[in-house]
Amino acid sequence: MPHPTTTCPSCRAPMHLHTLPGNHGHTVELDLCFQCQGMWFDPQENLKLTPAAVAELFRLLHAHRGDAHHPLANKLDCPRCRGGLTQGFDLVRSGRYITYRCGNGHGRFSPFSSFMVEKGFVRQLTRPEIEDIAKRVAVIHCTSCGAPADIRKDAACTHCRSAFSLLDPKAVEKALEGYAHAGKGAAPATTKAPDVADALIMLERDKQRALREQQAQSGRLFSTKDSSSDVDLWSIGIALIASVLDD
């Protein structure tokens, strides 16, 4: 039985309900908060999503990439019982990720990035990639927990100690093979995944366009100052995945 409108455990605003394909012909009603970049899973719901559902989820995240983002609140509440959620860490082969669980068993709140780590869609950045990013920006945001880190000095996230990682288009493409293209009646396409430098260029182009529009509305002259002071590894990954899915 569906629940009433789910409120975000962090910002308490109503979450967006999206119906996605589930296993065995069923559907999954997933609650998303694009501002807090998180999703609420009722018990076992995260195990019921098909690869086609994950492909649709990527498209949703990319479509909302320009939404204003809120930092997570210090205290997260279960949207079912209003009890506090307990923060913890889970470890899978692809890395370490944060979880926020209801002690009464009503479900869990998962940052978008944690869900992707859980599903094995990430890989650790290579040393050349880290050096390439360091030439352009000083601060990055951890894919696992979102904390800022100085990529020129830190070898891993100083908050959760996870290695710097990136959503991996090749892993995602393999997992979605036969699903993302199934509705088109075509065989799975082979695509060349763009590299991190290309993703940085795409993100910078989006950022500059948004800044121009904002400044045009306010009547100010356009300036590129401080436009690339930091970068979100999650945003880079979403840009990479979107370019693969759109091919």
Image (cartoon, rainbow, N blue to C red):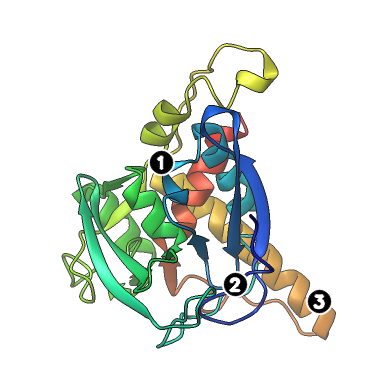
Q: What distance separates the C-alpha of mark 2 from that of mark 3?
A: 24 Å
For the residues labelled 1 and 2, the Cα–Cα distance comes to 27 Å
Amino acid tagged 3: Ala
Task: State the residue at coordinates (53%, 28%).
Answer: 24
Q: Quadrant of residue 106?
A: bottom left
As displayed, is residue 190 above or below residue 212? above
Q: Say which quadrant the C terminus sits in.
A: top right
Dot 2 or dot 3, earlier in sequence: 2
Q: Residue at x 77, y 70 (%)?
A: 213
Please state which amino acid type lies under the numbered disc 2.
Gln
Q: Name the quadrant containing residue 35.
A: bottom right
Q: Secondary structure at mark 1?
A: loop
Q: Amino acid at mark 1?
A: Asp
Q: Which residue is mark 2?
A: 35
Q: Which mark is drawn over residue 173?
A: none
Please state if 49 lies on the left or on the right of 125 as rendered.
right
| Mark in the foreground, 1 or 2 | 2
Lateral position of residue 245 relative to residue 172, left or right: right
**Badge 3 element:** helix
- Circle on res. 195: 1
In the image shown, does 215 or 179 lie closer to the viewer?
179
Q: Is residue 206 visible?
A: yes
Tell me which numbered mark, 1 or 2, is placed earlier along the sequence: 2
Return the x and y of residue 146 as percentages of the image width and height: 38, 70
Q: Which residue, given by chain and number where applicable, does mark 3 sit on?
A: 216
